[in-house]
Amino acid sequence: MASLKILALHADLSEVPPHRNTERAPRIADVATKAGVSTASVSRALADPASVRPELLERVRQAVRVLGYTPNAAARSLREGRTRTILVVTRKRWSAPFFSEVLHGIESALAVAGYSMILANFDTGTPREAAVVDMMFSGHIDGAIVLSGMVASSGGRSMLDAGLPVVSIGASVEAIPSIVVDEEAAMLRLCWHLVSLGHREIAYVTGPAVNANEGVRRRTVESFFRERSDCGLDVIAGDFTLEAGRAAAAAFMALDPRPTAVLCCSDEIAIGFMGAAQDAGLDVPGDVSVTGFDGIEFADHCRPKLTTIRQPRRELGHTGAARLLAMLRGEAADSITLPDDLRVAASTGPRPPLPSS
Amino acid sequence: MASLKILALHADLSEVPPHRNTERAPRIADVATKAGVSTASVSRALADPASVRPELLERVRQAVRVLGYTPNAAARSLREGRTRTILVVTRKRWSAPFFSEVLHGIESALAVAGYSMILANFDTGTPREAAVVDMMFSGHIDGAIVLSGMVASSGGRSMLDAGLPVVSIGASVEAIPSIVVDEEAAMLRLCWHLVSLGHREIAYVTGPAVNANEGVRRRTVESFFRERSDCGLDVIAGDFTLEAGRAAAAAFMALDPRPTAVLCCSDEIAIGFMGAAQDAGLDVPGDVSVTGFDGIEFADHCRPKLTTIRQPRRELGHTGAARLLAMLRGEAADSITLPDDLRVAASTGPRPPLPSS
DNA sequence: TTGTAAGCGTTATCAT
DNA sequence: ATGATAACGCTTACAA
C-alpha cells in the first residue's frame, strides 16, 4: 500500500490499477482521454482490433490495462439491445442428481459462447412465476431454457409471448424446440424387460402429479399394461424423492397379491424403494424386481445396482444450449431426440417361482 | 384469437396485449402517452404508488396493463447503478447433492428480495476465471457468493478488487464473511467417535487436492492422529466422486495392516467406498467402519446408513444470501458458523476383535 | 402533485 | 482510419 502511494506521487493518480471501491469505475471516456483518442476509437479497438491502426490499438490496450477498464454491461446492453444472458427455469424441487448434470452441460456450452446463465425456480401461481415471466419482457435476458416441463405464465401472458427464443430440455413442450429422449420408447423397453422376465403383476410408482415427465411415463406404463390382459398393474403415488420411494415400499407391501416387479418414475424413487423393501425383509430382485429412470450416478452405487434408463444428461444440457444459441443467431431450430440407453443391472431378475404374497 | 381481432377493430391497435415479437416492446414513453401523463409520473407511479394522485395511478396502471409494459432492465440498471443480480461462483465439478441444496437456499432467499442469480463455474487459470473476474467489474452484478472456497483472480486482479460485497458459503475464505460449519470440530468428533469405538488403525480418503474443505478436513485428521502415538493413519487420495470412493477401496484392500476404519472426505466418497468394499467381501461395519461428511440424502439411503456430519445445506445458502443482501444495504457483515450435527448410523461399529488383515 | 430535462456508459451512424 | 454525436430507456433532481 505504502509503495503504491509513493508510486502515485510520480505518476498520474488514475494510473494506479485496479480502481478501488472508493473511486468511480473507469469509463470508456477515461480510456479515450488517457490514450489520446476518441471514445469511438476505443470502442472500435476493443470490438474489432483489425479496424484501427496498430499503433492506436496498442495505445488503447495500454490505457485499458493501466486503468483496469471493463466495459459497463448495462450500458452495452441498453445500446445493443441484448444482454448475453439467458434464463434457465426450473420448477419445484428438481432432482438434483439429474438436473445438476444438465446444468453443467448448459453452463459450459453457454460460457464458451460468452453467455451467462440466470437460474430461476418457480412454482405455479407464486409471485416467482410472475417474476420469471416479467424477466422475459424486461430485456434482462436474450432467451430461455426451460427445465420445468412447462412455460411459466402470469397475468394473461406466458413466457413465450415475449418473442424471445425458448427451448425445453428434458420434456417436450408444445410450440418450442425440445431436447429430449424418447421417454415413451424408453419406458416401453423397461416394461418389456420386466414382462420378458416373466413378471405379470407389476406396480408403478409415480412422480409428482404436476410433472410433465411423470405424465408421459405413467401413461406409457398404463397403456402398455391395459393392452395386456395377462398382466395387472398397481399405481402408487410418489414424487421424485428417496423418501417417496420408501413410502411407496410401505404401500407396496400391503398389496395383495403383491406384484413381483416395480417400475419407478425416477432413480431416486427406485433407490428409496429398494432400501425400504430390503429393510422389510424382501430380496431384490429375488422377491421383487425394481427399475428406475434417468441414470444418475447413485444408480450404479446402490445395492443391487439399478436397472434404469440412462439419459445423456450432460449432452441434453449442451445440446439445448447450443440450440438456443443458434436461435439467437437467427437460425431455425427444431426439436431433437437424443439416444438413451436401457441399462440392465442386478435390481431386476426373473419372476419368483411362487406367488410372493 | 378471433374475438381479440374483432375487439381490435373497435379499439386502438396498440391496445392488444401482450405485444408480440414483431413489434417493439413498449417503453415508458408509450405508457405516458396512453395515460396522458409524463414519463416521470409513470416512473413514480410504478416505484412509489403513494406519491401520485390515486386517479393518475389508476390511469397509469391501466395503460401498463393494456400495453403489457415491463420496464427495461438495462436502462434501469444503467441509471440506478445496480442490477439486482448477484453472481454465484462454483468451481470444478461440485458435489451436486451438497451444492444443489445450498443453491436452493440461496435462490429462494434472493428471489423474495427481488434478486436474480447468475451461476458461473470456473477452473483456475481458464478463460472462464477471467470472465468471472470481469463480471465483477462490469457492473453486471451487485455482489457475489462464492461456493468455490476461493476467489477468482485474473490479470493481476481478484474478484474482491471490484469492491463489491462478497460472501463465501461452505468454506472460510480470508477477508470475506464466510458462512460455514466448524469443519475442524466436526471432523474431530468423527475421529473421536472412531477412536472411542476402539479403532486404532485408520485411513483417510481425501477430496481433490485443490479443494479448501479437503485441506481443512485432512489437516484436522492428520494432526489428530499425529498426537496419538497409539494410532496409525493412512491417507488415500481421492476426489468428491463415488468412483473415487470405489478406487480408494481398492487401495484400502492392499494396505497391510489393513485399517479397521475409514474417514472419507465426503459422503459420496464414503458411499462409493462402502459399495466397493462390500463387493470385495468386506462387511461394514463388521470388517471396516466408514464415515462420510456433508449429510446428503443418499447417506440415509445406502446400506448400511452412513455415519456422517450433517451440514445445514439449505440454511447455509439462505444465510449466505441474507448476509449478502445486508451488505448491499450497507450493513457490515461478519462470518458466521452454523451448527452441524454428528449423525451416527450403522456404518460405524466397534473395532473387529481380531486384526482384520 | 406533476412535468421538464439531464445523464447513466456504451455503440454505431455519419461526417471528415 | 478516426472523431463528433445521437440514440438506447430509464430515474431523479429541479422547476413549476
Image (cartoon, coloured by chain):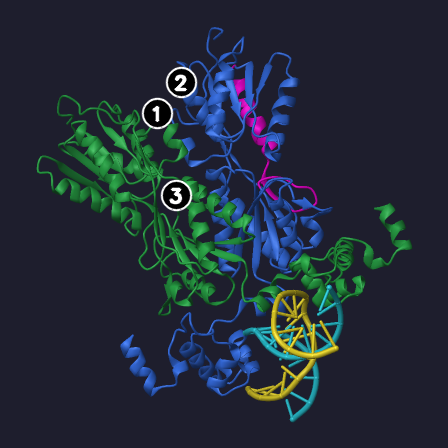
Chain colours: A blue, B green, C cyan, D yellow
Q: Which residue is mark 3?
A: B95
Question: Whole-Å distance between the Cαs marked 3 and 2?
Answer: 27 Å
Q: Position of residue B120 (x, y in %)?
A: 46, 55
Q: Are marks 2 and 1 in contact (CB under 8 Å)?
A: yes
First in sequence, mark 3 or 1: give its number.
3
The residue singled out by tag 1 in the image is B303
Name the amino acid, label 2.
Answer: Gln
Nearer to the camera, B255 or B73: B73
* Residue beneath the point at 54% across and 58% down: B84
Amino acid on which the number 1 mark rests in the picture: Arg
User: Start and end of the magenta stretch?
Assistant: A170-198
Secondary structure of the residue carrying tag 3 is loop
Residue located 55% across and 39% down the image: A339
Q: What secondary structure is marked by label 2?
A: helix
Q: Is residue A164 left or right of residue B206?
A: right
Q: Which residue is mark 2?
A: A278
Mark 3, other Cα within 10 Å: few <14 / some 14–19 / many ≥20: some
